[in-house]
């Protein structure tokens, strides 16, 4: 969609790491109409165990890659670095490419925060612009984590449901909007700045890199003392 390169490998759990019980955390319900009534108001999209498992896998791997990138890149500007060695940060909008090491570690933590939401049985609803971008990347990558799983993989022991792998449902219901994707449009070069006329006419808000970690509201503030995984 945006020319992002998928350079994924299957992530294996590390020693002592437990896989969340997504079957219990995201128990699915069956509507009485069995999906036969197209006008049924009870047949809403569900985040199923299998979908949650793949999203979680994608988010944790992206976090690992982002921390690796941040360590290797330091405070280098991406245009001055060897782009073939980066896994995540050259997939972000160009306005982030001059970010410093601290910003990149906070971006890596955004993937971890959403993965932690899933591990607690919560929908991974972004609380800031960085998490919106993190979730967009995870939704794009998640299907690739199904391709190389053998039939004996524990993923296939999770209950099946008609909403499994409906990534359009994730895109429709897990975001407040998709404004952050406008940062990839060359014709909207100034859209990140709240003083930009196009920004103001569309009510986009501040999408400049420095504002990516500002919470959307008081109800969505992450614990500032949570630290970093690595």
Image: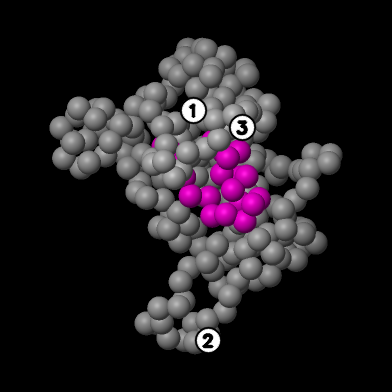
Judged from the image, the secondary structure of the residue bearing numbered disc 1 is helix
Q: Which residue is mark 3?
A: 226
The quadrant of the rendering that contains the N terminus is top left
Would you place residue 91 above or below residue 19 in this image?
A: above
The quadrant of the rendering that contains the C terminus is top right
What is the C-alpha distance between the residues marked 1 and 2? 47 Å
Q: Which residue is mark 2?
A: 32
To which quarter of the image does residue 99 belong? top left
Q: Nearer the viewer, residue 177 or 155?
A: 177
Q: Which residue is mark 1?
A: 90
What is the C-alpha distance between the residues marked 3 and 1? 26 Å
Horizontal side of residue 196 vs 67, given as left or right = left
Magenta range is 110-129
Farthest front residue in view: 218
Residue 184 visible at all: yes
Of marks 3 and 1, which one's residue comes earlier in the chain?
1
Of marks 1 and 2, which one's residue comes earlier in the chain?
2
Does the stretch in magenta take in 113? yes
To which quarter of the image does residue 16 belong? top right
């Amino acid at each position: 969609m945006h020319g992002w390169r998928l350079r994924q490998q299957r992530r294996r759990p590390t020693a002592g790491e437990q896989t969340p019980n997504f079957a219990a955390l995201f128990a699915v319900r069956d509507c009485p109409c069995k999906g036969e009534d197209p006008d049924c108001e009870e047949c809403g999209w569900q985040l199923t165990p299998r979908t949650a498992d793949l999203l979680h896998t994608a988010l944790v791997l992206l976090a690992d890659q982002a921390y690796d990138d941040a360590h290797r890149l330091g405070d280098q500007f991406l245009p001055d670095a060897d782009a073939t060695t980066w896994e995540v940060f050259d997939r972000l909008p160009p306005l982030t490419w001059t970010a410093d090491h601290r910003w990149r570690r906070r971006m890596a933590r955004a993937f971890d925060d959403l993965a932690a939401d899933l591990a607690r049985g919560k929908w991974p609803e972004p609380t800031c612009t960085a998490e919106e971008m993190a979730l967009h990347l995870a939704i794009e990558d998640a299907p690739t984590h199904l391709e190389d799983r053998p039939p004996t993989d524990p993923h296939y022991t999770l209950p099946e449901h008609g909403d499994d792998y409906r990534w359009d449902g994730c895109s429709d219901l897990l975001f407040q909007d998709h404004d952050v994707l406008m940062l990839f449009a060359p014709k909207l070069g100034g859209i990140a700045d709240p003083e930009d006329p196009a920004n103001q006419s569309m009510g986009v808000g501040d999408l400049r890199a420095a504002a990516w970690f500002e919470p959307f509201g008081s109800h969505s503030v992450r614990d500032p003392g949570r630290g970093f995984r690595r």
